[in-house]
Amino acid sequence: MKKAAKTVETKAGRGSVIMPGVKLGKGVVIGCNSVIHSGTVLGDNVCIGDNSVIGKPLQLAKTSTLKAEKLPGLKVGDGTVIGSGTVICAGTEIGRTALIADLSFIREKCRIGDFTIIGKGVTVENQTSIGNYVKVQADAYVTAYTTVEDYVFIAPCVVTANDNFMGRTEKRFALRRGPTIKRAARVGAGSVLLPRVVIGEEAFVAAGAVVTRDVPERKLVMGVPARIVRDVPDDELLNTGQEKK
């Protein structure tokens, strides 16, 4: 006679609040003093640290240029780990086996891919897409309307921008957009990517660079403003054997 399958129970720490309308998969673990807002969907074996706010409703300032709207609930894929003191807003989707580290903040209408790491203290602003197997290291700032493709590496304290007019003039709305970082590009520590620049596939931005124009694929740039120095060597390219399936 076969033994009955063991039921994996959800565990919630002291002081945590799970609002009505939350859907929890099997084996979810929630730390102490965390809040899971209505509409949130957590997959199997999701782990949430202490003092986190998950599925936070949209709250806008009276002076915000965004329109208030009702957003769908946050979705978190199977096996994802969310650190302590993290805030993730409603209307966002996080893939499988991702890691969202302590003290990170992810706004509404974002997509974070499978097996992606968002480091400690990272901010991801609204309507940003981050692909699979991406690494965004500690204290980076990913501005709104940014696109980050698969296998990208973003080092600590990188800053991105999306508005060349810094809040002045109406024409900025049609031109506002963050950088696009193509597949397997690498962005060095403390560098700054200005609005609308495209970092080409397998390109390399050196630490401390200020990127004011597009970077061609497989080129290394450095300096202020960043200039092309050389090609990225063949042995540094992400080949098929290195990729995780």
Image (cartoon, rainbow, N blue to C red):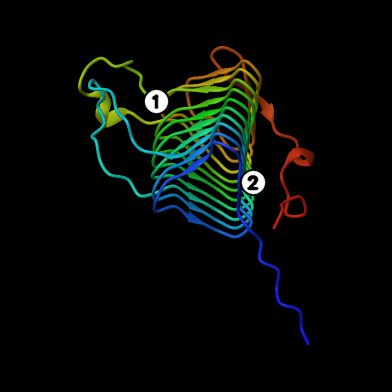
Check the image and name the residue furthest to the top: 224
Q: In the figure, 24 relative to 221: above or below?
A: below
Q: Residue, x 58% and y 22% (percent of image)? A: 158
One can see residue 185 in this view: no
Crowd around label 2: few <14 · some 14–19 · many ≥20 (10 Å): many
Q: Residue furthest front?
A: 14
Left or right of 239? Residue 221 is left
The residue tagged with tag 2: helix, strand or loop? Answer: loop
In the image, 35 versus 207, the foreground residue is 35
Could you tell which of marks 1 and 2 lies nearer the N-terminus? Answer: 2
Q: Amino acid at mark 2?
A: Tyr
Dot 1: what SS? Answer: loop
Determine the CA span between mark 1 and mark 2. 24 Å
Q: Nearer the viewer, residue 104 or 154?
A: 104
| Residue that appears at 73% across and 50% down | 239
Q: Give residue 230's position: percent from left, percent from top.
A: 68, 27
Depth order, front residue of 125/37: 37
Residue 162 image label: 1
Instruction: Check disc 1: other Cα within 10 Å, few if <14, some if 14-19, many if 20+.
Output: many
Percent from the top left, x then y, of residue 165? Answer: 31, 16
Res 162 → quadrant = top left
Q: Position of residue 75 (x, y in %)?
A: 47, 51
Most distant residue in the left direction: 170
Seen in the picture, residue 96 relative to 67 is either above or below; the reply is below
